[in-house]
Amino acid sequence: MKAGLRLFGPLMAPRTWRTTFHAVAAMLLGVTTGLVIWLVVVAWWGALLSLIEGPTGHPLLPVLYLGVVAFGPLVLLPFVRFFSALQRERFRALLGVVIAGPRHDPGTGRHRLLRPWTATSTWRQFAYHLLAPLVCGAGGALVLLCWAALPLTALWEHQASGAGHAGWFGGAGALLLAAPWAAHGFAATDTAMARRMLGPGRAERLAERVASLAQSRADLVEAADTERRRIERDLHDGVQQRLVSLALNLGMARAAFTDESPEILEVLAAAHDDATAALTELRDFVRGLHPAVLDDRGLDAALSGIAARAPLPVELRVALAPRCSPSTEAIAYFAVSEALANVAKHAQASRAEVVAERIGDRLVVTVIDNGRGGAAIDSIGTGLRGLQQRAAAVDGNLTVVSPSGGPTTVTLAIPCA
């Protein structure tokens, strides 16, 4: 019983019937679409040869040949793409195999007509449809032969007798038992060929992967910036308000209990000073996470605040219209903040200049100081390496030009979107 199931079980398996239907559909569709493509190619080639050999017969024939030569490729390309879509749908519907279609870059101007024919994906699809009548036709015919061998032998059994009779039925039975494996093998071969020729190529897959990684990276940057803004709001509306209330209450208590003992007054004074210092540190921390003024009034106002708090004179020039994305403005804000902090700490400069402008689709921020120079991205304690990494995360770049003796120029260029 178990041996019979192992022998005849594959004949009734659902996968066998799916691959069999797939083989029959491949044969019918492949032969039909392949013949259409071949007819267009032969007609175009024949018209071209007729034009080369010179006009013969009716005077309008050269005009007809010229039209076929001129418009044949324009007709062939939609046929190739449409038939490729039909074939991919066949794999999806019958085998559950999803084959992504190659992306088509339409190009611009005069390249719109030539770009599809220079794409390797077009020629791969074209080759598949030229081979389809042979490969799909032969594979589907073989699968049908395996299934139909026994019924055909039964119809023709009167033509054989004796040993020949047994030989015909034995061969037909062997073909029937081999039918599932023939269907599976053809499905695997056809799928491999379709993935190779109807789907995106290696270069296209790499390009899609790069685009996907770039989008994922941009999403991570946006998510991190959104999370910083959320933390800033929570701290501003929660902890900071409580510290403000605590500092006010301690200040009022310190002013009200002037008649208490010196020990109590000293404790109140220390608590009030600690609360005030904690509030100042928290405000600096919140501003370092994401300044609220950046969302409320834009990069111009946020950079004005940095320049006003700087310990040296800073000339600020901002020309941003329209505004860039919040993530871009945040990166520019922190770059200017870090650069001015480095100027105040390391450069021994007497003045600095900050220029922020939108050039095309990029935000360019330049920080210049008249200090001693010698700064580098890899310098320890400057934070420039972190700024360079943040810029690179959004396909931007950070450059530092700082010869010995100065001046130092830090330039950040990042996409606005």
Image: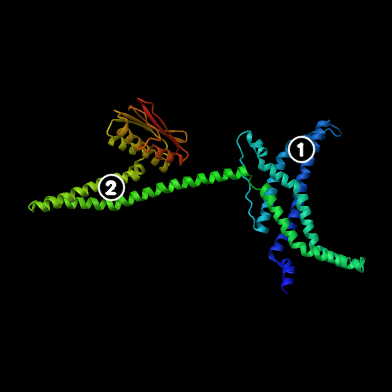
Q: Which of marks 1 and 2 is in front?
A: 2
Find residue 122 and report its image quarter: top right
In the picture, measured across the screen, residue 387 lies left or right of residue 169, that is left
Answer yes or no: is residue 70 visible.
yes
Crowd tier of the residue under label 1, counting other residues whose Cα lies within 10 Å: few below 14, some 14–19, many 20 or above: many
Q: Compared to 384, does 5 lie above or below?
A: below
Q: What residue type is labelled 2?
A: Leu
Q: Position of residue 388 (x, y in %)?
A: 42, 38
Q: Residue furthest bottom?
A: 1
Q: Distance between the residues labelled 1 and 2?
A: 77 Å
Which is more toward the observer, 324 or 167? Answer: 167
Q: Position of residue 144 (x, y in %)?
A: 79, 60
Answer yes or no: is residue 78 visible.
no
The residue tagged 1 is 68
Report the number of discs: 2
The residue tagged 2 is 282
Q: Position of residue 11 (x, y in %)?
A: 74, 66
Find residue 416 and report its image quarter: top left
In the picture, measured across the screen, residue 143 lies left or right of residue 78, that is right
Which is more toward the observer, 381 or 115? Answer: 381
Q: Which amino acid does label 1 sit on?
A: Val
